[in-house]
Image (tube, rainbow, N blue to C red):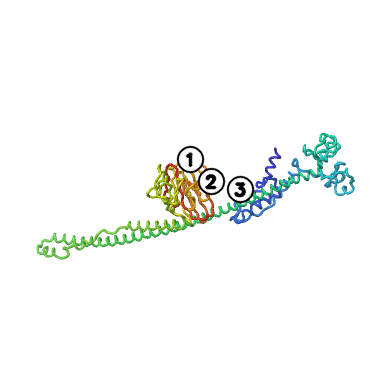
Amino acid sequence: MASAGLREELECSICLSIYTDPVTLRCGHNFCRGCIHRVLDTQEGSGGYVCPECRKKFQERPALQRNITLCNIVENFLSTKPGQKPVISCSQCFHALVPAVKSCLHCEVSLCENHLKVHKKSPEHVLCDPTTSLEDRKCSIHKDKLLEYYCNQDAACVCVSCYVIGEHVGHKMVSLPEASESRKNKLRNVLQEVMTEREKMEKRVQSLEELRKSAQEKTDGETEKVTVVFKDLNRCLEDLEKKVLSNINRQAEQVSLHYDDVLRQLEIKKEELSRKMCHIEELCNMTDPLTVLQESHTGDLCGMEDRHKQLHDGGDLDVASISHTLHTGLSDIMSGVTGGVYIQPADISLDVNTADNDLHVSNDRKTASWANRILKRPKRPERFQDWPQVLSSQSFSSGQHYWEVDIGGSGHCAVGMCYPSIDRRGDWSRIGENKKSWVLNREDDLYSVIYDGEDIWLPEFSSVRVRIYLDYEAGQISFYALCDPIRHLHTFTVTFTEPLHAVFRVWRGRIKISGGRPEM
């Protein structure tokens, strides 16, 4: 048990074998030098390097430090490990341990290079690679006989006595070298098949690595693009905030100045009134009637209301102007974001001239439903004849577009895209059953995507609203379930050769094209 635990500690986490020339990363994890070299090579050009064990990131390719202590532990473990091939020494070298180069099956000894030169070379002295299992080379029945033949019938190695007088008499025999060569030829064929299969796996791994790299590059690109959008958005919002606050402050200063002027005039009026009050009180206290009558008719005591009637309390913030500036600025920012980066939903409408006579199209051309009766529409070459299907009026030959469809009203329906050259009658006109259409299909609660008659079944999802996304230049048609969060269902990757139309099939019930909004 202790040996098994030690072996686990001495296994490389990449190749799952005992370490070969172990090296250490800065994070402290150990790997075979060759294994970690290959891993780091695959990470070239990805913007950094990652430890396969702890996922620690390194900006530059990490230096590999040979772990001398671990090397010694591995060597000691391999030298004492049960089943490890022992070093066979020469049986004739009594005073030193000299490695043997051959073993003699006849003499049952192992020989070094020097003793092999003087060893007898008669036919009965059969030489083989160094071995300690000399008894395994002899027949278990005829103890003194060497195994020299191979019985094809019993798949067993036998001696000459077994061949001539033993239980293998009459069986088809070949010599051990001949049988070995025959087995090697079969193994070479198997090896070739394994090598071919491995090459396929390597190409597959390379392809997947390229796809992963492409996906990572796309992710990095989208991340950078979104980051730029939000930086610009924050900058625009900050500029708009400064503009609106500046407008408010400017108006506030104007209002404050106005009130300062009014208050100053009112203070002057107060002083004037106070002075007149004193003068009037003096007149009222006079005893000379003539003086009272003469001075009470002076201009200072008349027309005061007319003189001050223009003073008022006017002046306030222009809230309507502030609101207009704010909303106009926000609208301009939103227009810049949606128009400059994100995709506006396509305005999809149904082409009645392509609709099968079992299919009813609403007046706004947004809803297709099962008619429950055969409609008598004019015959047209573009009209579907055998399946309740309809195309969109719009076609797309470039750019990125998306639209959304509510399929909750129909248990049997299909939505997707097709070429305008699709057949309009016959079995091959059913969308998904040919090489000219790509659809998401619903049968009750079962969903699949179909192309050229091949179904790829999808896991269940709860939403009955789906989004179809087209990137014509990238050759991609993608389907999404509008759950929370949005769930990617499948992407077809194609090299498009024609414009594309949205296409719909409804069997019972109805489907409806719904308006979408750019995802913010």
Q: Is residue 331 above or below residue 507?
A: below
Label 1 sits on residue: 445
Q: Amino acid at mark 2?
A: Gly
Q: Earlier in the sequence, mark 3 or mark 1?
A: 3
Q: Residues within 10 Å of mark 3 (few under 14, many from 20)?
A: few
Q: Amino acid at mark 3?
A: Cys
Give residue 499's position: percent from left, percent from top. Answer: 48, 55
Q: Amino acid at mark 1?
A: Asp
Q: Residues within 10 Å of mark 1 (few under 14, many from 20)?
A: few
Pointer 2 with pointer 1, Cβ within 8 A: no
Q: Quadrant of the N terminus?
A: top right
Pointer 3 with pointer 1, Cβ within 8 A: no
Q: Earlier in the sequence, mark 2 or mark 1?
A: 1
Mark 3 or 1, which is nearer the eye? 1
Q: Gap between marks 2 and 1, in whole Å?
A: 20 Å
Label 3 sits on residue: 54
The residue that appears at 16% across and 65% down in the rendered structure is 299
Pointer 2 with pointer 3, Cβ within 8 A: no
Mark 2 or 3, which is nearer the eye? 2
Give residue 519's position: percent from left, percent from top. Answer: 45, 51
Q: Quadrant of residue 506?
A: top left
Q: Is residue 230 visible?
A: no
Q: Quadrant of residue 328?
A: bottom left
Quick one: 334 or 353, which is closer to the camera? 353
Mark 1 element type:
loop
Label 2 sits on residue: 453
The residue that appears at 50% across and 54% down in the rendered structure is 471
Relative to 4, is 306 on the left or the right? Answer: left
Q: Residues within 10 Å of mark 2 (few under 14, many from 20)?
A: some
Relative to 409, is 207 on the left or the right? Answer: right
Relative to 291, is 364 on the left or the right? Answer: right
Q: Is residue 503 above or below residue 310?
A: above
